[in-house]
Image (cartoon, grey):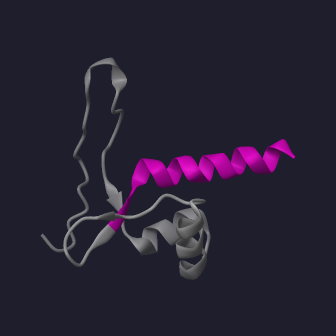
Amino acid sequence: MRGWSGEGIVASKKNGEVDGELRFMRLPEVLVVCGLSRSTVYAYVQRGQFPAPVRLTARTSGWGRDEVIEWARGRIRAGRAG
């Protein structure tokens, strides 16, 4: 399944507990979304300031897309608040 992106997989539960597309992002995509360097992402993860990656296989990790997007939205809110 190399190169498979999971596009088109939709997860849903009653009462909207899971909304939209459930997928993982690999590091290159995370860096594009957050605008940080690799070393800064890992430093923020260590300090609890950025979502931690999830182990997908023995050699592969990824970030929950929704967690990364929510982090980015939080940065926008914080930047506009003052």
Nearer to us in this view, 39 or 21: 39
Q: At which x and y percent is residue 71?
A: 57, 52
Image coordinates of residue 76 in percent, x first then y, are: 70, 49
| Vertical relation: 38 (above or below) 17 | below
Query: Is the residue 72 above or below the residue 52 in the image?
Result: above
Main secondary structure of the magenta stretch? helix
Whole-percent x, y for residue 50 in the image: 55, 60
Instruction: Answer left or right for 63 relative to 22.
Output: right
Range covered by the magenta-colored residues: 62-82
- Residue 76 lies in the magenta-colored region: yes
Vertical position of residue 71 compared to residue 20: above or below:
below
Residue located farthest toward the right when viewing the structure as drawn: 82
**Any magenta on residue 67?**
yes
**Is 22 placed left or right of 70 in the picture?**
left
Reply above or below: 22 against 34.
above
Residue in the image at 78% along x and 51% along y: 79
| Residue located farthest toward the front when viewing the structure as drawn | 47
Residue drawn where x is 33% and y is 58% of the image: 24
Q: What's the residue at 22%, 72% (across, down)?
A: 3
User: Which one is nearer the viewer's eye here, 10 or 77?
Assistant: 77
User: From this viewpoint, which residue is outermost toward the top?
Assistant: 15
Image point 48% across, 66% down: which residue? 30
Number of labels in the image equals 0
The residue closer to the viewer here, 35 or 62, is: 62
Determine whether, in the image, residue 41 is placed left or right of residue 59. right
Report the quarter where the N terminus lies.
Answer: bottom left
